[in-house]
Amino acid sequence: MTEAESAAWRVPPRWALLVAVLSIVTAEVGGASMARFKVELTRWARDAMLARPAVHGLVGVRDVDERILDEALVKFDAGLRLFHMHAEGMGLVIIATTMVAATVVRAGAVRRTIIALLTTGGAGYPVGYLVWSILIPSYGLERAKTIAEWLVWIPFGSATILALWWLAGLIALRLIRP
Amino acid sequence: MTRLLAPTILAAIILATTITPAAAHHVGAYVPKDNAVTTNFKQVKFSVQAKKFDVALRLFDAGALRAEMHAHAATLPAGLEAGTRVALQTGDGPEVERRLMVFFAALARDLALEADRRLAAAGATAETRVATGRKFLEAIWRYYNLVDFAVAMRDNKTSVAVRLAFDEAETYVKPATGGAAPADPARLRQPLQRIAQVLSTLIEASSTPPRRDS
């Protein structure tokens, strides 16, 4: 490797870039849909919650139930917003970190593994917010959160964190042994 | 055996540094909002405090407070709504405050009675009854809290009695932590009954306007 080559940034694999761009695209579509269908989404969530009073602990007294419904609707909306924000942000994080991995990590297998973890973890994690939000009307706040946690947030979030620590370690190693 | 120790420790550290932060995701915070009745109460109250009785009357006529007084007419002292309207028309601030205090005390009392009735009903699990009790307590406090100051100004003993009963009720619905006793729905009925009884006495005593000697 020449000095000019080693100083140049390398483009990550195209599939990783495609996943990152798709993450940003879904974030934008999600954000636009949230604004466009806000009333319909709220109505659907409210009806679904009213159809499952036991799940949400509704007691049939308006003064009590309206606060429960309001909290669930606020969290339902927050889930959609957080999906929009995280999918946008993680798309950029995927591009940046996979580019670092493609440039810095020499060993092919390690590089591919780190890129795969960063891409799947980064693209999967925001989906957890969408899953949480969609599950709230059917399963209630806490159960929906637990499902999203074990199905999406923990596995995909762990993949990203693991890959980032690995990458940080390799960069530190390169500082010691260039 | 010792050869396995290092990789095991390393794996544990890796898992601890990855899964723990991954599980600590941000899911937003919920701040309870005012409902239509409490919002309208605050609008009327602040207008009265600013001596803008025409504004207060307009807000009362068009707002949820009056509609709610209509809806609860059967359990409220006779003429509460009409009397509130007259007090607003004549610019009698203390009378408006007294009547609104009676109204919210009645709402809180009705919720306490309903909560007691629900807790007495057989069939539900202790966990469900605790959750139901907790939600009712939140709703009772949301209404009573609005008029506690007005109650304390007129009858400090009633205010203290309600707050003590409320504090006691809260201890029976809190989840057990440390050395605290576990949630107990059966004991929750007693403070709820006390809240209902104390508020009923207050409503009865406050339903006749005090004679003003000049």
Image: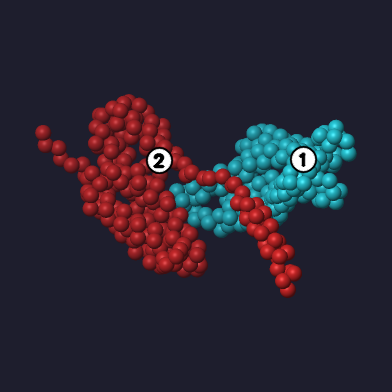
Chain colours: A cyan, B red
Rendered location of residue A5, percent (x, y): 86, 35
| Numbered marks: total | 2
Whether residue B107 is visible here, answered yes or no, is no
Distance in Å between CA atoms under marks 2 and 1 = 55 Å
**Disc number at residue B38?**
2
Rendered location of residue B198, percent (x, y): 28, 55
Do tag 2 and tag 1 residues touch (Cβ < 8 Å)? no
Whether residue B45 is visible here, answered yes or no, is yes
Residue depicted at 37% across the width and 60% down the height: B169
Q: Label 1, secondary structure: give it.
A: helix
Three-letter code, disc 2: Thr
Q: Nearer the viewer, residue A23 or B211?
A: A23
Q: Nearer the viewer, residue B81 or A8?
A: A8
Quadrant (top left, top right, bottom left, bottom right) of the N terminus of chain B: bottom right
Furthest residue in direction front, as rendered: A177
Furthest residue in direction right, as rendered: A1
Q: Nearer the viewer, residue B78 or A16?
A: A16
Furthest residue in direction bottom, as rendered: B1
Residue depicted at 60% across the width and 51% down the height: B24
